Amino acid sequence: MSWEETHPFKASSAESDNIKVPPGRPPPPQPSVGNARRFSGKSFSTSDLGSALPQEGKDSKRKTIFFLRHGESLWNEAQKKNNVGKMILNHDHPLNAKGIVQCEEFRSKWTFAARKRDDNPEEARHIRAKSNAARIVSGGTLQKNGEWAAKIKAEHDQSKVALDTYFETKFFDAQTIVVSPLTRAIQTAIVCLEGHPAAVQSGVTCMTACREIKGIGGFDCIGSVSGDEMEIHAHAELIKILGPESMDKYTTRVNPGDATKEWWTKFKDSKSGTTRRIGDFWDQLYKHEADTIIVVGHSNFIRKAIAETAIGAGSADKELPEKLAEGTYKLGNASLLAADMFFSNDHPPQMVTVALLFDSFLTKEEGARTKAITKAKSAATKAKSQIGSKLGFSKKGNPEN
């Protein structure tokens, strides 16, 4: 089965043109939509970066994509405490206080780095010049694809500092921001990216294709609002923790994008459905006129979306591409992954270089069996303690006097 057959393009809803304006705010900017594209071709299975990239073509594109995971949510907190029972009656859980702090810390880090760049404009111009020289020219191609790949890889692999600086500069200059329509992701975009040039100029735009993958249960993946109510709801949840002044502190606009109607599912996402949605996600990034995009989303979706693309990618951290390709590591809360991606009209997207920025990190994803064992042990320990207490035994197993 071809890439095109398993990754059909699904156009964004045109109904986003008719947006109701939340009280007291100007209408949000509209997202630009290019021509729809589809991918078809073979998968990648080689560690040779030069040969891993598809053959050049007039529709080849190189883009820089930033993946930002949301801060800790109430559901994440409940999972850590093995206490999700109380959360079942609620859906679309927002950030908790810790998650908001994580987002504010992330914003502090990138704004500090941005100020350092502004204090040294000559270095900034040099970095931007190198970045532009390294880009694919003439509409997205070089005479030889392998030559381009080798040039980029050699340049990026010089040192972690050079790669981080390259990606940081690209992050500051990102042209557009897309976000999952789930509340915790919208709140993360509002807090983390407040003051970012793209957020100031165009706000953030919801993209239903990058919502979280819903498993069995997965009540945090069921949406609660759509359209303009998403922005209102996200701010209402921030106000519960930060107070009314948060409305003045965080001013980033939220464009509903294609989430103008009920966009969520109440059922478990199938494997085939997830594959198609990931293909839709890459299609939309490929067709977007921006070549530097920030995506605010979720651990499982990001993990699955990039796993197959990371084979053979270059990085100053040699283990990073391997961990991403393995598919068992996920981004930490409020962590940012930067990736240069190669797109072609006859090939799936391929990651060229990758880095974690602003002290971001990956965490090992526990398998379902490991989680079940941990949960069972915790329940057994709790039950044993309760029984011992009823029988008059202390925690050490000795009869209480």
Image: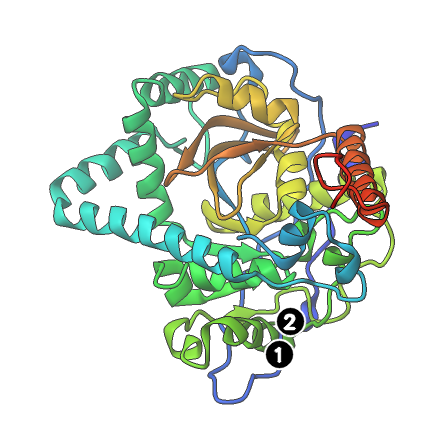
Residue name at image x 82 percent, y 58 percent: 265
State the residue lying farthest toward the bottom: 24
The residue pinned by badge 2 equals: 16
Query: What's the mark number on residue 333?
Result: none
Give percent across and percent down for residue 155: 32, 21
Q: How far across and down, in percent of the image, does residue 295 sit?
A: 53, 49
From the viewer's perspective, is residue 63 above or below residue 354? below
- The residue to which callout 1 is attached is 19
Q: Nearer the viewer, residue 98 or 333?
A: 98
Neighbour class for label 1 at 10 Å: few (<14), some, many (≥20)? some
Q: Secondary structure at mark 2?
A: helix
Residue 320 percent across, percent down from the top left: 50, 23
* Color style of the picture: rainbow
Query: How many C-alpha atoms fall within 10 Å of the one at disc 2: few (<14), some, or many (≥20)?
Result: some
Which quadrant would the N terminus be assigned to in this image? top right
Query: Is residue 224 found left or right of 325 in the rendered image?
Result: right
Q: Nearer the viewer, residue 135 or 353?
A: 353
The residue under label 1 is which amino acid type?
Ile
Mark 1 residue element: loop
Residue 37 in view here? no
Please tell me whether residue 325 is drawn above or below residue 110 in the rendered image: above
3D distance between C-alphas at marks 2 and 1: 6 Å
Query: Where does the image place residue 338, in percent across and percent down from the top left?
Result: 45, 37
